[in-house]
Image (cartoon, rainbow, N blue to C red):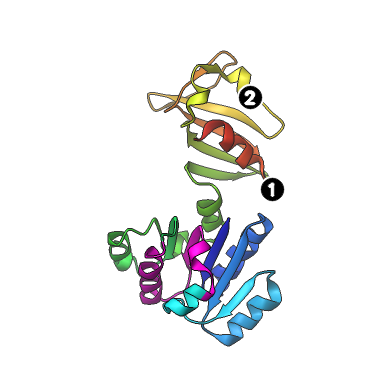
Amino acid sequence: MYVVIMGAGRVGITLANLLINDGIDITIIESEQEKGAVAAAELDAMIICGNGTDTRTLQEANITDADVFVAATGNDEANLLSSILVKDYGIKKVIARVSNPDHELAFKKIGIDDVISPERTAAGFLEKVITRPNVADLTAFGKGDAEILDMVITNPKVNGKKIAQLSPTEDYIIIAGYQGGHLKIPQPDTVLNTGNKISILVKRGNSFQKAAKIFLK
């Protein structure tokens, strides 16, 4: 996966560190030279000093190869314009930080996948949005070395299989199922099908990817 982040502020730097630790390739675009220099000293990533609202800068960042673009500056106008520009490059997912809640509608009107307002703009949350697609919700568990994830099964290969055939493994365990909106404690002979919502406990690291290969199409 390749991610381009516009903005080397606190959120951008912290997010980049998290993604790099996940083994994801990162490029950061930063218009202020001083912030760019700090990012270059802290991160094992390409840092481009330029404006993310400039197509030449986006092309320098190899935007056509990006899977995700994150507009993480504190300037709503810059984030909006850059998001509009990268849409023309066919980016799979565009995420934008919005400081003024009144501007959220404008972002959503142009088809931004995820609009993150200040109260949700934690770098850790952005990391989950990027690295855990199709997960309905998640909760850190213990000392951060595990997570509880809610997901809806979309892989038809799961149809008709019993929980005992799929869980537990060394990487995850199904801890809950849902029927009619009510939580049910899963039993070994409980049958799973696409459309079922489940909660799983996974270890931090690549355990989510292993579980996703089983339950998500």
Q: Quadrant of the N terminus?
A: bottom right
Label 1, residues with CA under 10 Å away: few <14, some 14-19, many ≥20: few
Q: Image quarter for residue 88?
A: bottom left
Total numbered labels placed on residues in the image = 2
Q: Amino acid at mark 1?
A: Lys
Q: Amino acid at mark 2?
A: Ser
Q: Which residue is mark 2?
A: 167
Where residue 64 sits: x, y (%)? Answer: 48, 64
Where residue 36 sits: x, y (%)? Answer: 60, 81
- Residue toward you, 129 or 63: 63
Circle on res. 143: 1
Question: Which element is circle 2 on?
Answer: loop
Q: Image quarter for residue 211?
A: top right
Question: Which element is circle 1 on?
Answer: loop
Label 2, residues with CA under 10 Å away: few <14, some 14-19, many ≥20: some
CA–CA distance in space, label 2 to label 1? 23 Å
**For the residues bearing labels 2 and 1, Cβ distance under 8 angstroms:** no
Residue 16, placed above or below residue 175 = below
Q: Image quarter for residue 8?
A: bottom right
Closer to the N terminus: mark 2 or mark 1? Answer: 1
Q: Residue at x 28, y 65 (%)?
A: 106
Residue numbers of the magenta segment: 60-89
Residue 28, placed above or below residue 111 = below
- Residue toward you, 140 or 62: 62
Residue 200, placed above or below residue 63 = above
- Residue toward you, 7 or 174: 7
Residue 18 magenta-highlighted: no
Q: Classify residue 168 as left or right of residue 52.
A: right
Q: Residue at x 51, y 35 (%)?
A: 216
